[in-house]
Image (spheres, rainbow, N blue to C red):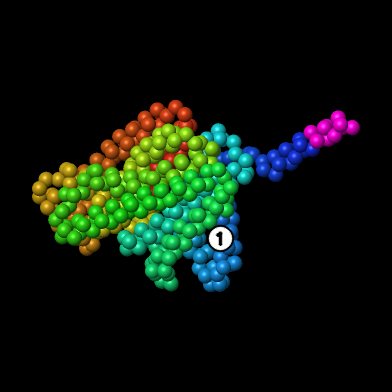
Amino acid sequence: AAAVAVAAAGAYALWARRSAAAADPVVADLNAKTVKGKFMDTFKVLVDEIEAGDKAAMPPNAVKWVREMVEYNVPGGKLNRGLAVVEGFRQLRRGVLKESELFRACALGWCIEWLQAFFLVADDIMDASITRRGQPCWYKVPKVEMKACNDCILLEAHIYKIIKTHFGSDPFYTELLELFHEVTWQTSSGQLLDLITESEQRDSGGGDLERYTYDVHRSIVVWKTAFYSFYLPVACAMMLAGITDKAAYKRAEDICIKMGEYFQVQDDYLDCYGDPEVIGKIGTDIEDSKCSWLVVTALTRADESQKALLQEHYGKSDPASVAKVKALYVELDVKGAFEAYEKKSYEEITALINAEKVLPHGLFLFLLNKIYKRSK
């Protein structure tokens, strides 16, 4: 009888394991199209969860507002940051993911897209931007205006609701919260550097353009862009995969910071030379007197008369001044300088990746291949 009981227990355990596996199968064809489809399906689930919570606490008009606001601002971009979490996790798992694991990676990826939306809605207000992702900035929608300030707060709050719902019982829950809080602080600090550098230059009457240096530019872009656009997706994938080695995170950060710097220099270039129909926005760095890589490069190449022209026209919104700055960029071959910078940066980033002996190179190459020689 005892032998029969043991056999029965063993059979039941085998059946339970097979049933669990059947309920949570390995994703058979984990190609880019499959991942993108699963990613978008996950967004719908997350929005429904947020709406369900709102319905329990708010009247219908507020529930409708939040859903419309989220659908307008969160999913419209290239989604590279969110998809990088999924791809990074896939690389760390050597290409084998169960359905539940893929969903969790997608959910965590969407947390970064929510963070991106929070930053962009606020950034557009601060920069008085006109369009974003091929449509009017959220605050430019007539019924929205400055209500967008509160919507920024809601977007950030959603991140922590999603994390608590789907990762609250994980051993890395506290570390994940700290990661998002730290990156939010880093990014907002970078935005502050950008804003005060711009305003101080404006307050000087345009006569202090020499404060714009490569060091100042790098400090802005590393803090404003590199941490949340590159390190955050990679660190999220590493946490999901159970990596706890602090040295591995530091090596990943070094690679990601270099990629982030290159990405923002591209952004500066596209602000001036990109097609608004392609990049989804109208560039305003010249009018806004931004500490752009282009103006820093122009200053390093300009003679005294050319510097005087920049001092006179940079930061002015009239079309004639903008045209004169762009003409000077052509005269100084700023475009050629960018092409040389891009080539050198790609070689340096590739060398850093190739030197990594523990983490899979695909963890970083997915991001690098997405941004190299991009047009938007």
What secondary structure is marked by label 1?
Answer: helix
Is 83 situated left or right of 291 in this image?
right
Looking at the image, which residue sits at the far right?
1
The reply to whether residue 319 is visible in this rendering is no
Observer-nearest of 307 and 318: 307
Observer-nearest of 315 and 1: 1
The reply to whether residue 217 is visible in this rendering is yes
- Counting from the top left corner in percent of width and height, residue 310 is at 16, 53
The answer to whether residue 317 is above or below residue 15 is: below
Is 89 situated left or right of 368 in this image?
right
Residue drawn at (58%, 63%), measured in percent from left and top? 53
**Residue 247: within the magenta?**
no
Residue drawn at (44%, 54%), measured in percent from left and top? 115
Residue 153 falls in which quadrant of the image? Answer: bottom left
Structural crowding at the residue carrying mark 1, measured as other residues with C-alpha within 10 Å and reported as few (<14), some (14–19) or many (≥20): some
Looking at the image, which residue sits at the far left?
304
Looking at the image, which residue sits at the far front?
2
- What predominant SS class does the magenta segment belong to? helix
Residue 266 falls in which quadrant of the image? Answer: top left
Residue drawn at (53%, 41%), measured in percent from left and top? 240
**Residue 3: within the magenta?**
yes
Observer-nearest of 141 and 355: 355
Q: What residue is pinned by disc 1?
A: 50
Q: How many marks?
A: 1
Observer-nearest of 173 and 318: 173
- Counting from the top left corner in percent of width and height, residue 155 is at 46, 59
Residue drawn at (43%, 65%), measured in percent from left and top? 150
The answer to whether residue 141 is above or below residue 327 is: below
- Counting from the top left corner in percent of width and height, residue 75 is at 49, 55
- Counting from the top left corner in percent of width and height, residue 355 is at 40, 28
- Which residue type does callout 1 highlight? Ile
Find the magenta span and give its range. Answer: 1-10
